Amino acid sequence: MSVWHSNKTMRTWLLSAAVCLSLVAPALPQARPFAPAPGRPERGTPKLVLAIVIDQFRYDYLTRFRSEYTGGLKRMLDDGADFTNARYIHVPTVTAAGHATFLSGSTPSLTGIIGNEWWDRTTGARVTSVSDTQTHLLGASGEGSSPRRMLQSTIGDELKASGKGGKVIGISIKDRAAILPAGHTADVAYWIDAKSGNFVSSTYYFNALPAWVTDVNHTHPADKYAGREWLHHKLPEPGPALYGEMESTPYGNELIQQLALRALAVEKLGQGAKTDVLAISYSGNDYVGHRYGPDSEEVHDMALRVDKLLGELLQAAEAQAGRGGVLAVLTADHGVAPLPEVNQQRKMPGGRLEAARMSAAIEAALEAKFGGSHWIAFFGDTGAYLSLVPGVNPAEAENVAADALRAYPHVARVYTHTQLEKGELQADAIGTKVENGFNGARSASVLYVLEPYWIAAGSAGTTHGSPYGYDTHVPILFLGPGIKPGRYNANVAPNDIAPTLATLLDIETPSGSVGRVLSEMLQESPRLPRLLH
Ligand SMILES: [Zn+2]
């Protein structure tokens, strides 16, 4: 794959572009932003794009539970386009990386969103994909979040830049899942603050929450779930325990659904002259999946419930924008591994590793070789960030750490930063995903991939992040104007969603897109005959 090479080329190009600009800048008249003509959408152009993610939703949840779906998933499967073989082309397969890919078509190597969190070498601090010390929360107290670490444009950004974009709104339980798909120029992203149970946003978007959101918060919408029982799990009384716990039940998704339906109505989405975007991500499925695993009755129930929420959302959107006015697309940010104990009962491989022990093994190897201490600045989802020590060649330290990891049972692959920076790796299915997930400035000093079905997830529950099918295979469903319904079996990737949307909307493809247009699903353009006149 050429993604890595084009990354290098792009860097060279950017460098020369920057030099050129600085040379000619004084001669340029003061730049005024181009204001595109406020054109009406062409006939057949959707008035509202519903961009939907179900957090941690494997493709096989569509096939396993299909006969029980009655809502939005059933409609999208029956009347829409169903891509049966969509797989991520990056690791780690985690929330932030998947959500940044969704409406950019890009890879973590290019979006810079290499994980949910990483070590920021410039400030020497742990950062999340959306943490932003320059902002604060609105609707609760604390530091805010923003899309500033995202390096590429999204569909919303391109819609706005084209002059055809109306409102762009992101909603989720998680900040990263609300913010990253919506993009830089979004009007707003809302998420839930687990401490207060409030809907919140950040000063990145505006200085105060809209009155209607504050009004919703005044009703303490989360408190009505106090004491509620779901499949033998009972929720606590109002307070932080309830708000935190609620995320791992169907009620977190219900809450953001209420906000989404309200946003549709109050912001009159789909009723303006331009195309609006509502990006919604149902995080509840991820919290439940981590705790109980993909084979649990809880995950089954969550799938049936999200299907109902989707049906309701589609109906509300179509009531407002007209049945032919809504273009809906649905995917997931990643899948999940089975619980190791469940898998072992099936005579399948797998088991649990402890990240803290892996980290300690690396530390011990480095101390034995070079002396000193505190070699590991940060041990994250994908690997270890090593401290820079005067007199020690970083590449040598990486090699020592890599050997320690290779010797660790059930570690399948190990890569060093230096090796990846030079592009020296086995270009097979795993190597390519590691390459697509590697960003030189942000990625770890030593990266690892575990054997299939092995997870570093403590003593209970399960997780995701691997390059294997159970983590990479996700749904892609499209429904709406311009879409030929059917079942499409070719190998595709979630990276194909954004360039396809850009084509349907007749706007520029997002800046870092590496996907292809899913042209097999597109109806013939109604505009061609007009061009002939
Ligand atoms: Zn997760």
Image: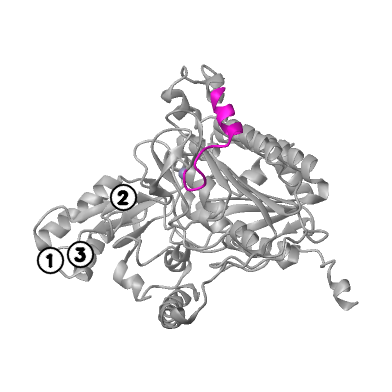
Spot occupied by residue 287 in the image (x, y as percentages of width and height): 49, 37
- From the viewer's side, name the closer residue of 187 and 81: 187
Q: CA distance from mark 3 to mark 1?
A: 16 Å
Task: List the residue tagged with mark 2.
Answer: 126
Q: Residues within 10 Å of mark 1 (few under 14, many from 20)?
A: few
**Is residue 485 visible in this depiction of the protein?**
yes
Image side of residue 277 versus residue 123, left or right: right
Task: List the residue tagged with mark 3.
Answer: 400
Q: Secondary structure at mark 1?
A: loop
**Is residue 490 visible in this depiction of the protein?**
no
Task: List the residue tagged with mark 1.
Answer: 390
In the displayed orientation, state which residue is furthest to the right.
533
In the displayed orientation, state which residue is furthest to the left.
371
Which residues lie in the magenta part?
A: 203-219
Q: How many marks?
A: 3
Position above or below: 205 against 498: above
- From the viewer's side, name the closer residue of 287 and 188: 188
Image side of residue 69 versus residue 95, left or right: right
**Which residue corresponds to the image point at 54% horizontal and 45% vertical from the top-left?**
178
Amino acid at pointer 1: Pro
Q: CA distance from mark 2 to mark 3?
A: 24 Å
Amino acid at pointer 3: Val
Q: Residues within 10 Å of mark 3 (few under 14, many from 20)?
A: many
- From the viewer's side, name the closer residue of 392 and 466: 392
Whichever of labels 2 and 1 marks the residue nearer the N terminus, that label is 2
- From the viewer's side, name the closer residue of 108 and 324: 324
**Which residue corresponds to the image point at 61% horizontal and 68% vertical from the top-left?**
34
